[in-house]
Image (cartoon, rainbow, N blue to C red):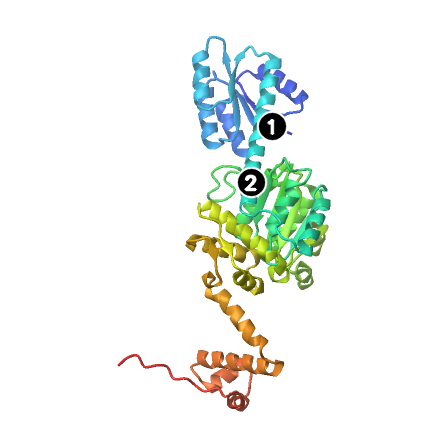
Amino acid sequence: MKTILMIDDDKSFLKVYAEILRGEGYGVETAESGPQALRMLEENYYDLVISDVVMPEMNGIEVLKKIKAEYPDVLVIMLTGEGSISGAVEAMEEGAYTYLVKPLDIDQLLMNIRRAMEFLELNSENRSLKSKISRMDAGGQLIGCSRFIEDLKIQIQKIAPTNASVLIMGESGTGKEIIADLLHANSQNSKGPFIKVNCAALAESVLESELFGHEKGSFTGAVSAKPGRFELARGGTLFLDEIGELSPKLQSKLLRVLQEKEFERVGGTRTIKVDFRLISATNKDLKAEVEKGTFREDLYYRINVVPLYTVPLRERPEDIPLLFEHYLDYFCKEMKKPKLRPDEECMDILKKYQWKGNVRELRNLAERLAVFADGEQLSAQMLPEEIRGQRARSESMDQLGFHEAKQEFEKKYLIHRLEKNNWNISATADEIGLARKNLQLKIKQLGIVKTPKDDTKR
């Protein structure tokens, strides 16, 4: 329901027009002075304010200036008497949406209110569209030809139109946020807001205020009331990333919101009704966290109505060429550089690399290469040493049998530990859990010899 605040020192005017607007389906509250209206704005969110210009104590222009300074997204319609055109002109210069002349024509008032609400909707849709375009340009889509990607697309098509809560699980960097974007974009709530919160990025007290909002004076620094993410997500989708990081206290509070669809702001007593779709994501095994007692079982089943799983990039190497070339094209275009084309050897190395950072690591590599590229050909030698080196190590290991590979690993491991402990046999043995004599025997068997460092100080 769209909300309107009407300001006028004429009580009978407020009573009559408030009833008319409520009959049209708007939520209407009234204030009889500018200061009272500003106090109400601190405590509540309104889509539209309708204010008289001529009022004692604080006139409508002063109220308008305060509103546009503190709540720039709130639209304001000013009411002026006949012959007060100068006041109307000043109101428009100060950011009023429009002005109407008293006595009001009810049809004209309703028409302007409808236009104002349509303007708000259009602005919201434009912001959402720009955000989607930005995400799509930067790779905010499911790219790949693997069976996993094809199956995931089918699942999203089936799940998105419902209002079921979704839990997306998988390693960091595997595209969980992109999946959430697609679920919202193809949902019944796609015209509504898409509000994202990273639960791992904020301290508990800050996160609570972000989610629930707060009232003025509820804590040090709360100089005005602020709506939380639950309120902002009304009629849309709330995406809680890294939900496994929620504290037990916030888990309990979130469960109540999901069950009752209502809450109170921090420091407040007024119950606020909300309705949104919840999408959550985590890189943790929440089932294991439930068994350990660190995540509430009832909350787990509440958020995990429909589970979706992402697969690490190393397990779908057939997607790497498409993803890599997509990101290369994007960053070269952004930097106004010629398209980069990786050669066969380069792509072969990328497909064999382990990608511990998943798609995020691949994207970062593409950006780095685009920054330093001078021509149009991308050779294997242009790849970072840590990526080329892994291929070399892998090829070397391919030539060894199991016994030889095991010995090679043990030798490198023990040399690393010995160097770490300055070749102290006893300290190294204690650290790795071997008896001193057994470690000495291993050193002898593997032919490990301390290599003296060059003396560069002559």
Pointer 1 with pointer 2, Cβ within 8 A: no
Q: Quadrant of residue 244?
A: bottom right
Seen at 57% across and 41% down, the residue is 132
Position of 370 relative to 85 (above/below): below
Seen at 69% across and 53% down, the residue is 308
Secondary structure of residue under mark 1: strand
Q: In this view, does 110 lie to the left or right of 83?
A: right
- In the rendered image, residue 454, in percent from the top left (x then y), is placed at 34, 81
Distance between mark 1 and mark 2 Cα atoms = 30 Å
Q: In which quarter of the image is the N terminus?
A: top right
Mark 1 or mark 2, earlier in chain: 1
- In the rendered image, residue 34, in percent from the top left (x then y), is placed at 49, 23
Secondary structure of residue under mark 2: helix
Residue 200 shows in the view: no
Residue sitting nearer the eye, 240 or 271: 240
Residue 145 shows in the view: yes
Marker disc for residue 133? 2
Amino acid at the residue labelled 1: Thr
Residue sitting nearer the eye, 41 or 11: 41
Name the residue carrying label 1: 3
